[in-house]
Image: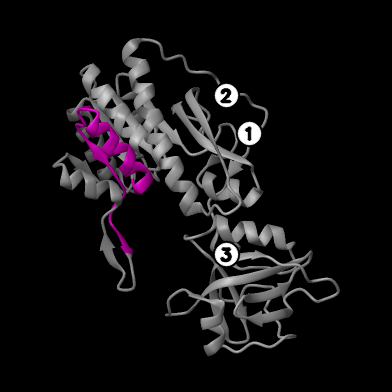
Amino acid sequence: MAETAALARETGAAGSGGLRVACAGTPEFAALALRALLRAGYEVPLVLTQPDRPAGRGLHPQASAVKRVALEQALALEQPRGLRLDGRFPDDARQAREALRRAAPDMLVVVAYGLLLPQWVLDLPRLGCLNIHASLLPRWRGAAPIQRAIEAGDALSGVSIMHMEAGLDTGPVYRMEETPILAEDTAATLHDRLAELGARLLLQVLLDLQQGVAEPTAQPNDGATYAAKIDKAEAWLDYRRPAVELERRIRAFEPQPGTRTRVGDAQLKVHAARLGRGGAGAAPGQVLRADAAGIEIACGEGSLVLTRLQRAGGTPVDAAALLRGLPLQVGDRFACEAPAAA
């Protein structure tokens, strides 16, 4: 955070070059970039973000993190449901197009927006569109790069600042910086590091552009992988898989969408786990140990110790607290498949 703030001061001292930088984004990852632009003195003539979505137990509509920043700073705001002029929401698309035309941005910065940009959007800003992408491109193009990197066991993640083109995350890259994926990283902890890194790299690229030294490099075709959007069926733990895969998935899906498991009639959300030392000769899903240290379950290879869980309608608790209300015995079996209705 301190490095980004220092760079914002440097950019502000050097002047923003009169650049008008619009922003399209939705979650906190994007809000951090928007705040960095404002601190650095860039004029933000328009913000695009997703419509308010139901959230929380009451499922009341809630503003995105980017919308909250835009409202705090009294920035012009649009929330189209779609941007394709020939799509499901043509009126929204036309309104957004007129707003972008009036804003006349030199550049549009896109960060985890959640809507595909049609060609008319890519063509409208004078200097095109920049994307902050949370991977080391071409590794993990697509919707869920943070989660897929952890799930795959990658040693490194990072941020790429890319000039957008029609292909999915295929544009040339201005700057890229890596960070190690730590053994204890969840999607939440890695997200926070990458968001800070992305905001800092964005300001560096904008300075490069102002100084005429920005030289984007085409992505190689070799090594490209696709970070598919997470399907809710993936959240259910299948103990027939190796324990190391399940432990990575738990960290990759924490906090959203989370991983789930079930034993008897109880469905549980799993927030944390570690690798166990048992499992040899036991059937996948069999409870090997259940005490204050955790619930150890046999897997296809090795075992997994669940340490922090949550019952439906409850709050996350450690294994000791869970077992007081859900007593388990050695030999009990956790299901290896999702329930039929999942």
What's drawn in magenta, residue-wise?
Answer: 26-54
State left or right for residue 271 relative to residue 205: right
In percent of width and height, residue 183 lies at: 61, 51
Which label sits on residue 224?
1
> Which of the 4 quarters of the picture holds residue 264?
bottom right
- Counting other residues with Cα less than 10 Å from the Cα at mark 2, is it few (<14), some (14-19), or many (20 or more)? some
For the point 43% across and 76% down, the residue is 315
Q: Earlier in the sequence, mark 1 or mark 3?
A: 1
Vertical placement of residue 342 versus 214, above or below = below
Give the amino acid type for the residue marked by disc 3 in the picture: Ala
In percent of width and height, residue 46 lies at: 21, 35
Give the amino acid type for the residue marked by disc 1 in the picture: Ala
For the point 55% across and 59% down, the residue is 231
Looking at the image, do the residues carrying marks 1 and 2 touch, with CB atoms under 8 Å apart?
A: yes
State left or right for residue 124 relative to residue 311: left
Q: Nearer the viewer, residue 303 or 167?
A: 303
State left or right for residue 294 relative to residue 161: right
Residue position marked by numbered label 2 in the rendering: 219
User: In the rendered image, is residue 128 in sight?
Assistant: no
Outermost residue toward the top? 212
User: In the rendered image, is residue 216 in sight?
Assistant: yes
Vertical placement of residue 133 versus 114, above or below = above
> Which of the 4 quarters of the picture holds residue 276?
bottom right
